[in-house]
Structure formats: C-alpha cells, structure tokens
Amino acid sequence: MSDRYSVSKAVVTGGAQGLGEAIALRLASEGLSVAVLDRNADGARATADRISSQTGSPVFGFGCDVSDRGQVKEAFAQAAEAMDGIDTYIGNAGITRDRMFHKLTDDDWDQVIAVNLTGVFEGLRAAAPWLRTEGPGRVVLISSIVAKAGNLGQMNYIAAKAGVVGLVRAGALELARFNVTVNGIRPGFIETPMTAAMTKEAYEATMTSNPLGRAGQPEDIAGAVAYLCSTDASFVTGHILDVNGGMAL
Ligand code: NAP
C-alpha cells in the first residue's frame, strides 16, 4: 500500500453500485482492503469480486440493510473479521422518496430517515469498537448539495442529509482523541442509477446550470473520499466538502 494512507481497512455502505462502488474501487486501487455492504447482497458480492480482481486488493461483499440495526451490527462484525479490523467507514447508502411535503406519506418520511440518517449513524456506532482504538482512522459521510441549497419535493431527504452534517460535526469532536477524522461530502448532481430516473428536462436544466457545464461522475466523489482518507487530510476534520462543479456557492 502507498504511504499516502495510514489506514487500510474500509467499510463502504451502499457499495454495490453508483457512488459506493466507485468509492470502493478507488480505495481498493489505493491498496486498502474494502468491505462492500449493500442491501443487495448478491450485488455486494459481485461488485466486491469484480473490484478485487481488477485491483488485486482484498475486497469482501456482505448483505446489509442499514435501516436494520441488527444487520448493521452483524455485517460490520463480519467485515472486521474478514479484514482483521476496521479503521475507515464510508457512510454512503441512501435512497430518495421524493414528493412535495404535503404529499409525503408516513412511510416516505420514515424510510428516508431510517436509511439516510439513522442508517449512517448505526454504521458509525457499529464501527466504534474498532475506531475507538489506538491508530489513525477515517470516517467520510455522504450528505448532499440539497442539505445546503434546499430543493423542491425532498423535505425528507434534505432533513436526513442535513442530519448527516450534524453527525460529522459531532463525530469529529467525539473521535478526535482517537486520531480519527470525520468529514462529509455534499455531492452535486452525479450520474448514477439514482439520478438516471430524472426526466430529460430536469437533466438538461441541471446541466445548463452547472458552472463547469457537466454532470459529476462517481469518480469525482471517489477522488474526494480518497483525499479525505489519505494522510494529506490528516489535519482535516469536521469539514463538509462540496463536490458539485461550482453549484450553490
Ligand atoms: P444509487 O445508485 O441508488 O446506489 C445506492 C446503493 O445503496 C444501491 O446499491 C442501493 O441498493 C443501496 N442501498 C439503498 N438502500 C440501502 C439500505 N437500506 N441498506 C444498504 N444499502 C442500501 O445511489 P447513488 O447515486 O450512488 O447515491 C449514493 C449516496 O450519495 C446516497 O446517500 C445519495 O443520497 C448520495 N448522493 C447522491 C447524489 C447523486 O447525484 N447521485 C447526489 C448527492 C448525494 P438498491 O439498488 O437495492 O436500492
């Protein structure tokens, strides 16, 4: 592993596809061992196998629905056993259930909070026994540009993603004494299966309004995660990094 990293054992939630897959690939290509967790267990294992043969790093796939506390605890324990510990946690799994607030069902609210906020916290809690030990650690939590800028029809999602910013601030202070940094990323519009569902009009409106004139790619987020996990970022903690092509400055 390159000396650009002082950590070596990463868990990535929601890692079967999209941003999580790109993050897992990037960390494995930097020489870290990676555990890919996803509610799509077959997808997690297939992605892990693909990344492992592509990079030569040990990559493991486990089924885990982050909205189920028992599954989170069990999957993190399995990941720790496979990698002989955990020193890096990437809280990435997320969903959308978009509607204007007066049309949100109880389930729309509960599911999005359970996955995007409680699920991110549960991952941190499940990783605690390994993070709260001697030696460097890294936590990167995925928020969203809408936590800064707001958006129509996403009140549940925005509340959860703003909550993730709170987890970063609180986590940075609580884990600093263990030499663990805790940072967040607010991605802008990134082309993944999540955003493939956008209408052509919404896609074009997003593209034309981006100062850099393009949609973000999963590799743009993976690169930011790699930086925050590297030794270059060892004095950066409690920070929220906007990776969005200059939108909502
Ligand atoms: P994606 O393509 O939908 O991938 C998300 C992955 O997470 C999928 O494999 C999904 O499985 C999995 N997942 C969903 N719910 C889960 C759960 N309860 N437990 C474990 N895994 C679960 O989404 P993405 O675009 O890569 O987004 C990744 C993260 O970035 C999310 O937190 C999202 O909110 C955030 N984000 C994305 C963008 C963007 O423009 N793409 C912008 C800002 C923030 P299934 O396939 O079974 O659903």
Image (cartoon, grey):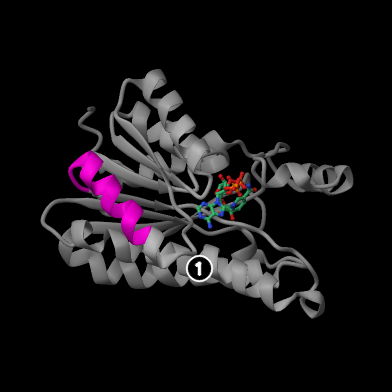
Image coordinates for residue 14, horizontal then vertical, percent: 50, 48
| Image quarter of residue 3 | top left
Using the image, determine if residue 122 lies above or below residue 29: below
Q: In this picture, is 137 found above or below 82?
A: below
Q: Give the residue drawn at x 18%, y 43%.
A: 84
For residue 134, side relative to residue 88 (left or right): left
Which is nearer the eye, 128 or 189? 128
Residue 173 can be seen in this image = yes
**Neighbour class for label 1 at 10 Å: few (<14), some, many (≥20)?**
many
In the rendered image, the quadrant that contains the N terminus is: top left
Q: Find disc 1 in the rendering and name its residue.
A: 117
Specify the quadrant of the image occupied by residue 9: top left
Q: Determine if the C-beta at disc 1 is less than 8 A from ligand 1.
A: no
The structure residue drawn at horizontal position 53% and vertical position 34%, both measured from the top left corner, is 219
- On whether residue 240 falls in the magenta region, the answer is no
- Any part of residue 236 in sight: no
Specify the segment rendered in magenta.
Answer: 72-85
**Label 1 residue SS:** helix
| Number of marks present in the image shown | 1
| Apparent side of residue 40 relative to residue 230 in the rendered image (left or right) | right
Chief SS of the magenta region: helix
* Three-letter amino acid code at the position of disc 1: Leu
Where the C terminus falls, by quadrant? Answer: bottom right
Nearest to the observer: residue 244 or residue 106: 106
Residue 99, image x, y percentages: 79, 68
Q: Position of residue 243 (x, y in %)?
A: 55, 48
Q: Residue at x 67, y 73 (%)?
A: 107
Q: Residue at 74%, 64% (x, y): give it.
A: 98
Which residue is the extreme one toward the right? Answer: 201
Q: Is residue 219 above or below residue 242?
A: above
